[in-house]
Image: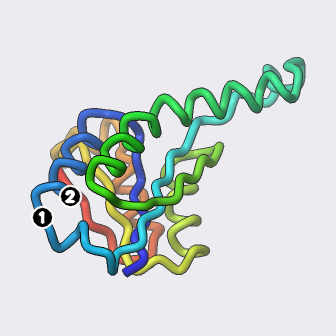
Amino acid sequence: MKILVAVDGSPFTKRMLGYLAAHDEWLGPTQQYTLLTVVPAVPPRAAAVLDRDLLKNYYEEEGEKVFKPIRAFFKKQGIEADYVLKVGHAADTIAAVAEKGEYDLLMMGSHGHGVLGTLVMGSVATKVLAHCKVPVLLVR
């Protein structure tokens, strides 16, 4: 199964990884994992005055902050995975990558806000569910 795992380094990502570790069926050799993190874009006006290499390094460093502990987790589990860093709006980017990559499943952690919390603050998970045609497994 081709699985896209959206990660942001939050406690909810850690909870999702704990779920993976606790369920052997997710860790078998038949699974193909791609880990995706999305770094918010620097506002266009600010990006216009920054050196291109500086901006690229910033995005790579932000992505690596998320990936470093996850690489250690997957290595400990003996699982090979691909790591993808994208820049943009998290929900839109996650949904687009899931569909374009023809994944069988998208896994992501969720804050688990109630209806009122989602209305007030919004939710990446809610927006992904609304825009993604790939099945989504939310881990709370």
Locate residue 31, reporting x and y percent.
Answer: 35, 75
Camera-side residue: 108 or 71?
71
Amino acid type shown at disc 2: Leu
Three-letter amino acid code at the position of disc 1: His
Circle 1 SS class: loop
Residue under label 1: 23
Which residue of the protein is positioned furthest toward the left in this rendering? 22
Percent of width and height locating residue 120: 31, 36
Q: Give the side of residue 133 with respect to residue 24, left or right.
A: right
Residue sitting at 54 percent across and 75 percent down? 99
Is 122 drawn above or below residue 32 in the view shown?
Answer: above
Q: Determine which residue is flagged by label 2.
A: 20
- Residue 62, quarter of the rendered image: top right
Q: Position of residue 110 (x, y in %)?
A: 26, 48
Marks 2/1: CA distance? 5 Å
Tag count in the figure?
2
Q: Is disc 2 in contact with disc 1, using a CB cutoff of under 8 Å?
A: yes
Task: Check residue 41 in the rendering and tell me which mark sits there, or answer none.
Answer: none
Vertical order, 88 against 100 (above or below): above
The residue carrying pointer 2 sits among few (fewer than 14), some (14 to 19) or many (20 or more) residues within 10 Å by Cα, namely some
Tell me the SS state at disc 2: helix
Above-or-below relation of 85 to 62 = below
Front position in the image: 20 or 37: 20
Residue toward you, 108 or 79: 79
Judge the density around disc 1: few (<14), some (14-19), many (≥20) Cα neighbours within 10 Å: few
Q: Is residue 70 left or right of residue 93?
A: left
Residue 124 at x, y = what percent?
40, 48
Which residue sits at x=72%, y=27%?
57
Res 106 quadrant in image: bottom left
Front residue (pair 57, 134): 57
Residue at 23% in and 69% down: 26
The residue under the point 25% across, 40% down is 14
